[in-house]
């Protein structure tokens, strides 16, 4: 039985869907103010694997992941680039779809845009207003967190510490420092919609509450997203949805861990900001995916050049081992039930993909194991690494550069340097074979 770590209860729980054989799953999608970065890659791959695994266990999964296409970040970016907001949104939405496909992520069953559900958002805010959860100040309509007694239950914060207090200076006219905007009054030149409170646009948090309710109904089986969304975004979603609809928002809250670059938090200000397409210049999407799956989804994950090289080498070896499996075994349609059982055990333990990869490696190295190809196919339905797809293995850019340097050294008859570079290349998992047409790089 699948066990998932539920952020709400802070423990692993046996997964039981609301309706037998069906799963309603909502994952917060991107704000499309720019092209996707590696943090997006980690989140997308995490929930793609969860969706694939649930499907492999014969659940009918309805997977909804939104696109936030109106937001302060988008407005500011459009002004910065002097670009029409709609054009910016469309261009970046296509970039997200393209780059997610490159890392093996399956499109959501439904991918709503926030601007398509403004009517539902206005209705939700009106319901909250009628129930006494809102107040209006100069810049918009706000949610009063002191009215929702369970505020803080997801992030496990004390609501009393979040309310206005003697030691806390609340900016503007907000009643409590964590009160959040539901409807933001528009400034001149900004996109706006009509509402009972005046022209404006929805707050970020209200978007997911309205869309998840409209498309899936409540409660959801699973609500997911990055750990950075737990507070305040998901906390605010709970406050809005449960106050308005009188139902639990989700039974299981799943959050993936944060991502660092070279053990430092990724940020543009630090100059270590990496987009997916930055990495795709030198590595395949499968390598990025392999690296993500090598760390448990709830743990902090690190991206570095060295780790990418390790993942590239490992993935290349995997593909070559599979390619060299004897033909008679590839015709064997039987699954290896023992290894599939071990794989399921790993995945049932809160999606332990590092352990699942170990099972895969053990299978491929087991000379006595039968049904390798069919079993790899079954495992790869979940991992999504395209292990059986026939393709030319991309030699990492670093190895190609070293091979070129070695060839230059040979032409200059610098045999000592050529031998040194050959040894360096070998340590990185590749052999150089000198042929009449030039050097040939062979993965070990």
Image: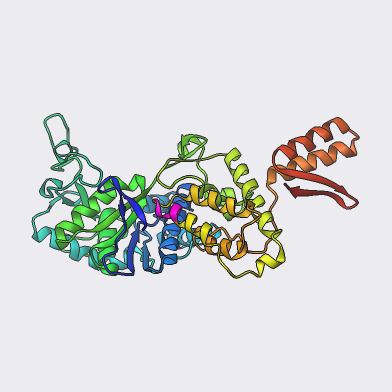
The magenta region covers 345-349
Q: Nearer the viewer, residue 257 or 401?
A: 257
Q: Nearer the viewer, residue 77 or 313?
A: 313
| Residue that appears at 14% across and 48% down | 144
Q: Nearer the viewer, residue 399 or 233?
A: 399
| Residue 347 located within the stretch drawn in magenta | yes
Asked whether residue 70 is in view, the answer is yes
| Residue that appears at 44% across and 61% down | 53
Please provide percent x and percent y for residue 343: 49, 55
Q: Nearer the viewer, residue 350 or 74?
A: 350
How many numbered circles are shown?
0
| Residue that appears at 80% across and 32% down | 420
Query: Which quadrant, please, contains the N terminus?
Result: bottom left
Relative horizontal placement of residue 407, taking residue 249 as reference (left or right): right
Relative horizontal placement of residue 350, taking residue 359 as reference (left or right): left
Please provide percent x and percent y for residue 281: 62, 51
Asked whether residue 187 is in view, the answer is no
Relative horizontal placement of residue 367, taking residue 353 as reference (left or right): right
Please provide percent x and percent y for residue 3: 35, 53
92 over 431 or under it: above or below: below
Farthest residue in the front direction? 368
Please provide percent x and percent y for residue 226: 37, 49
């Amino acid at each position: 039985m699948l066990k998932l770590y539920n952020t709400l209860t802070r423990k692993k729980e046996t997964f039981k869907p609301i309706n037998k054989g069906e799963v309603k799953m909502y994952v917060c999608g991107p704000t499309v103010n720019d092209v996707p970065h590696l943090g997006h890659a980690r989140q997308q791959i995490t929930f793609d694997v969860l969706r694939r695994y649930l499907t492999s266990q014969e659940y009918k999964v309805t997977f909804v992941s939104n696109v936030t296409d109106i937001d302060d970040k988008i407005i500011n970016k459009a002004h910065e680039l002097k670009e029409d907001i709609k054009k910016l949104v469309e261009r970046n939405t296509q970039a997200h779809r393209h780059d997610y496909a490159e890392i093996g992520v399956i499109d959501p069953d439904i991918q709503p845009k926030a601007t398509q559900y403004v009517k539902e958002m206005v209705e939700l805010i009106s319901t909250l207003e009628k129930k006494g959860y809102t107040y209006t100040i100069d810049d918009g309509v706000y949610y009063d967190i002191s009215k929702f007694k369970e505020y803080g239950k997801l992030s496990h914060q004390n609501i009393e510490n979040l309310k206005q207090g003697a030691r806390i200076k609340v900016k503007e006219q907000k009643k409590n420092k964590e009160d959040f905007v539901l409807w933001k009054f528009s400034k001149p030149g900004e996109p706006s919609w009509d509402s009972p409170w005046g022209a404006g646009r929805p707050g970020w948090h209200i978007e997911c509450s309205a869309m998840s309710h409209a498309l899936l109904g409540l409660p959801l089986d699973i609500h997911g997203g990055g750990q950075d969304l737990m507070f305040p975004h998901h906390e605010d979603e709970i406050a809005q949805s449960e106050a308005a609809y009188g139902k639990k928002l989700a039974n299981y809250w799943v959050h993936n861990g944060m991502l660092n670059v070279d053990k430092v938090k990724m940020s543009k200000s630090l100059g270590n900001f990496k987009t997916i397409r930055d990495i795709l210049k030198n590595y395949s999407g499968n390598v990025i995916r392999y690296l993500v799956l090598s760390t448990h989804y709830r743990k902090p994950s690190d991206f570095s050049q060295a780790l990418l090289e390790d993942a590239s080498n490992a993935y290349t070896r995997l593909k070559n081992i599979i390619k060299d499996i004897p033909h008679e075994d590839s015709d064997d349609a039987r699954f290896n039930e023992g290894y599939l059982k071990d794989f399921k055990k790993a995945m049932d333990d809160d999606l332990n993909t590092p352990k699942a990869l170990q099972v895969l490696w053990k299978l491929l190295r087991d000379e006595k194991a039968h049904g390798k190809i069919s079993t790899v196919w079954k495992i790869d339905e979940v991992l999504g690494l395209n292990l059986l797809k026939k393709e030319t293995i991309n030699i990492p850019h670093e190895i190609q550069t070293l091979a070129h340097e070695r060839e230059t050294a040979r032409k200059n008859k610098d045999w000592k340097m050529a031998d040194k570079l050959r040894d360096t290349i070998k340590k990185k998992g590749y052999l150089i074979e000198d042929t009449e047409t030039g050097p040939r790089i062979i993965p070990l």
